[in-house]
Amino acid sequence: LQGALAACIIRLQFSTSHNFFSPLNLLLGQMTDLIYTEKELVQSLKEYIKAEESKLDAVKSWANKLDVLTRASTLDPEGYLAHPVNAYKLMKRLNTEWSELESLVLQDPSDGFISNMTVHRQYFPDQEDEKGAAKALMRLQDTYKLDSESFARGKLPGMHHNAILTVDDCYDMGKTAYNEADYYHAVLWMQQALRQMDAEEEHVVSKADVLDYLSYSVYQMGDLPRAIELTRRLVAIDSSHQRAGGNLRYFEKLLSKQLNELNQEGQEPATEEPIQLGTYKRPNDYLPEREIYEALCRGEGVKMTTERRSRLYCRYHDGNRNPRLLLQPMKEEDEWDSPHIVRYLNALSDQEIEKIKELAKPRLARATVRDPITGILTTANYRVSKSAWLEGEEDPVIERVNQRIEDITGLTTQTAELLQIANYGVGGQYEPHFDFSRKEEPDAFKTLGTGNRLATFLNYMSDVEAGGATVFPDFGAAIYPKKGTAVFWYNLFRSGEGDYRTRHAACPVLVGSKWVSNKWIHERGQEFRRPCGLTEVD
């Protein structure tokens, strides 16, 4: 528009350079040109003003919308971000939508805004972060068997903040899955986008684009009749679509071939009923106990029988008459009988928890696992959380917590690993794993020189509104976070052999934020504190 305006001005300058003292007919002729030139100029000016006003209106709309949003979010930041949809949309806004606003403002550069963006951009999430947030929603969807409609409408248990996914949000979710060749989730989210689109919700993405992704993803899931039906809908909307016609002919030919091989005359056409959670089976992955693990996360399949419960007790625990526990013994509750898992109440005070979090927050980084071959700490897709390690010398609170763990367990913490603090946010999890190293990974803790991980002491530093349980798939136990409590179990038998039953997992956090701290206690120094038994499995 600025170019058009400049062109009109140049044309006007050229016209006025003529001699106006020519005969009147020439003057009138030239003036007529100038009239039309001026009209074009005015029209160009109006378009320029309209574009500027449109841009300003768009920026104002953004500002008003985000003003309302940030007012609500800053009233209770943790509560707001406890909703996984809010966390995803924050990632999406900062990575994608603010960049779009930046491009809009750049049409007429604003130095103040751009310098602000430049200063803050280093802290913005990137494309990988947005993708990770989308995958977290899908992980929650799978684990807790939540359909896309529930997420899109913000219908999650215990939620107080309203958060919805628009048509375009659902489309972006589906596209993220599609780009990862995850056609199962691509189908679910493209179908949700289509459902909301059919309900006449506002959207930017075209129905043709949604049907394009959906039809091909359905084909990848092996449902040719439905893929054909969806592609026909696409052709009906856009007959000139570059892929639709070819895809339709290919799908029909493939279906005909399959029917001939089965000696069938024909097949009932696919219905236009929306695809639901369960329409297609989720593909198997690398985790053999996936179904058991996720069922336990949902509270299903817990093997806590009446008989077993009758063998569980609560008691006061003084650490074998430890002087520090004599006047105020710990309240100990059995969580499971075999292997023996206990919970200690009031293991951490609120003040201690806040201090630990204060020390850990500046250092939180993507949590790592120890490579079983090299023994080096590295990140892994099956552990999604942020963690930090704190030494006892850093603060009296850390030293006091370490001493308390030693008093309670009767084991020395001199050879233990540092206190690890972990925060599990939206979709945060740690899939089934062993804390100890197996025989096939003899060098896992070689660099530490303290032997294997004998026991695990796990402090819960927050309550979790939904999800976040610690589950043991082998024997069907689910232990739920309770702020200020701690759970303890042995990873090794007295013989030093690993107890493979202790394979456990941290379920994805559905609603809320989960804070834990744990101490991995090693073998060295425990020779007289936990002597060997008479058999391999004592």
Image (cartoon, helix red, strand yellow):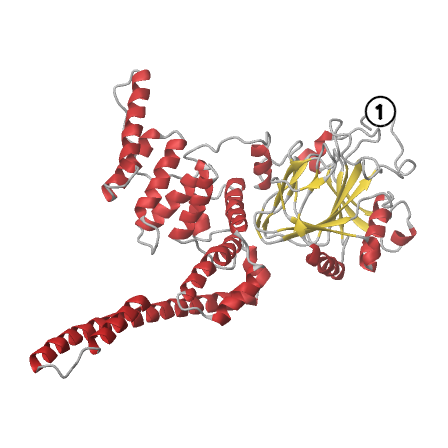
Q: In this view, does 104 lie to the left or right of 236?
A: right
Task: Quarter of the image for the C terminus: give it.
Answer: top right
Q: In this view, does 521 lie to the left or right of 84?
A: right
Q: Residue 18's x, y, as percent?
A: 18, 77
Q: Mark 1 points at which residue?
A: 535
Q: Residue 165's x, y, as percent?
A: 43, 53
* 390 versus 447 height, above or below: below
Write the residue at 72% across / 54% down: 484
The quarter holding residue 310 reads: top right
Instruction: Specify few, some or many for label 1: CA neighbours under 10 Å numbering under 14, 14-19, or 20 or more.
Output: few
Towards the viewer: 120 or 469:
120
* 8 versus 339 height, above or below: below
Callout 1 amino acid:
Thr
**For numbered disc 1, what is the local secondary structure?**
loop
The quarter holding residue 174 reads: top left
Is residue 157 at least partly visible in the picture? no
Q: Residue 132's x, y, as percent?
A: 54, 47
Towards the viewer: 111 or 237:
111
Task: Quarter of the image for the N terminus: give it.
Answer: bottom left
Towards the viewer: 219 or 355:
219
Q: Is residue 17 left or right of residue 189?
A: left
The quarter holding residue 78 reads: bottom right
Q: Residue 391's x, y, as percent?
A: 80, 53
Write the residue at 74% across / 30% down: 441
Write the residue at 51% across / 69% down: 71
Is residue 266 at least partly visible in the picture? yes
Write the residue at 62% across / 46% down: 468
Number of labels in the image equals 1
Spot the residue most to the bottom.
21
Q: Is residue 227 left or right of residue 181?
A: left
Spot the residue most to the left.
25
